[in-house]
Amino acid sequence: YDRFTLDLDVIAPLKKETFLPVLVDPSHSTGRAEMVPFAAKAGIGAGAHGLLIEVIGERTDPRTVLSDGEQGIRPSVLRDLIREIKVSSEGC
């Protein structure tokens, strides 16, 4: 298997070592659009400041995208993900 590992254990120590925002890339670490929301929520839950997410057009065939089509989520999925993360973070 050749995906990148999403190592959530490094987020907290990294935040202590830098003044820069710590971001998580759930698109490249999972490689599959259906897994991106889960990895994104895990990254934010582990303390990441933000996310890098591949987004493709709502009606775009992922097979026709020149790069990263299979891991790109739709704008509607991104909208729902942002709402879920906001609701979750407001409860903290």
Image (cartoon, grey):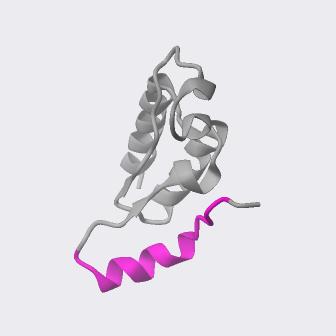
Q: Residue at x 48, y 55 (%)?
A: 25
Q: Is residue 59 above or below residue 71?
A: above
**Residue located at (58% from left, 44% from top):** 36
Residue 8 at x, y percent in the picture: 55, 69
Q: Position of residue 13 (x, y in %)?
A: 43, 83
All told, the count of numbered labels is 0
Q: Quadrant of residue 17?
A: bottom left
Q: Between 60 and 38, which is closer to the camera in this rendering?
A: 60
Q: Quadrant of the C terminus?
A: bottom left
Specify whether 47 is left or right of 32.
left
Image point (46%, 21%), residue name: 57
Residue in front for this viewpoint, 88 or 79 = 79
Image quarter in which the N terminus is found: bottom right
Spot occupied by residue 39 in the image (x, y as percentages of width and height) = 58, 52
Residue farthest to the top, as pictured: 59
Question: The magenta stretch spans which residues?
Answer: 3-19
In magenta segment, residue 5: yes
Give whichever of 47, 62 is nearer the camera: 62
User: Observer-nearest residue: 1 or 76?
Assistant: 1
Residue 57 falls within the magenta-colored stretch = no
Q: Position of residue 52 (x, y in %)?
A: 41, 50
**Vertical comparison of 58 with 17: above or below:** above
For the point 25% across and 71% down, the residue is 20
- Residue farthest toward the front in the current orientation of the protein: 66
Give the answer, above or below, for where 61 lies relative to 27.
Answer: above
Q: Is residue 41 visible?
A: no
- Residue lying at the far right of the rendered structure: 1
Q: Is residue 5 visible?
A: yes
